[in-house]
């Protein structure tokens, strides 16, 4: 059986390889990437007031900000001296893994139709026999 590879097959193989690799990479990154590397650096930790829209912490049924405002949160130094914890003492480090996960999944969704088109062209090229040249 002597079949020539037609343009649909070549284009389909190329698209499946290029876009399939991207879909696989983005999807794998979204679900199996290292999650502990996306923390806010310690030097850039934000004050509690700047994270109220994404972070809430309660102690004994009251918000941490309420405890800090009322001065009811106490800390103990290493030499057993007690002090009142102030707003400036509290810093928040956020893990931004979910933001990266959403970005990777969006990219996978953008590339997925091109991967599907490549599969269709590959299947069409394999099913459709190559045209034989007319010998006159």
Image (cartoon, helix red, strand yellow):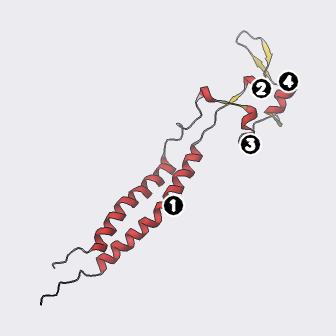
- Left or right of 130 on screen, residue 123: right
**Outermost residue, left side:** 136
Tell me residue 110's x, y (percent): 50, 61
Tell me residue 129's x, y (percent): 25, 82
Q: To which residue does mark 4 refer?
A: 71
Q: Which structural element holds mark 1?
A: helix
Please tell me which residue is depicted at 46% across the width and 53% down the height of the picture: 26
- Residue 87, label in figure: 2
- Residue 53, label in figure: 3
Instruction: Give yes or no for contact between labels 3 and 2 (Cβ–Cβ under 8 Å).
Output: no
- Residue 109, label in figure: 1
Which quarter of the image is occupied by the C terminus? Answer: bottom left
- Left or right of 35 on screen, residue 53: right
Front position among marks 3 and 4: 3
**Counting residues from the N terminus, which is met first, the one under dot 4 or under dot 1?**
4
Tell me residue 46's x, y (percent): 68, 31
Image height of 126 relative to 22, above or below: below
Which quarter of the image is occupied by the N terminus? Answer: bottom left
**Counting residues from the N terminus, which is met first, the one under dot 1 or under dot 2?**
2
Distance (Cα) linking label 3 and label 4: 22 Å
Q: Which structural element holds mark 2?
A: helix
């Amino acid at each position: 059986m002597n079949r020539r590879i037609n343009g649909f097959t070549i284009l389909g193989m190329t698209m499946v390889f290029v876009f399939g690799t991207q879909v696989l990479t983005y999807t794998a990154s979204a679900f199996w990437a290292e999650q502990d590397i996306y923390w806010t650096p310690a030097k850039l930790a934000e004050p509690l007031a700047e994270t109220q829209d994404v972070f809430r912490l309660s102690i004994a049924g009251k918000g941490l900000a309420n405890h800090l405002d009322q001065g009811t949160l106490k800390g103990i130094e290493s030499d057993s001296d007690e002090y009142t914890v102030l707003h400036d003492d509290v810093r928040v480090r956020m893990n931004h893994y979910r933001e990266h996960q959403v970005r990777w999944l969006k990219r996978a969704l953008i590339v997925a139709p091109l991967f599907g088109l490549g599969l269709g062209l590959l299947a069409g090229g394999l099913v459709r026999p190559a045209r034989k040249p007319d010998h006159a």
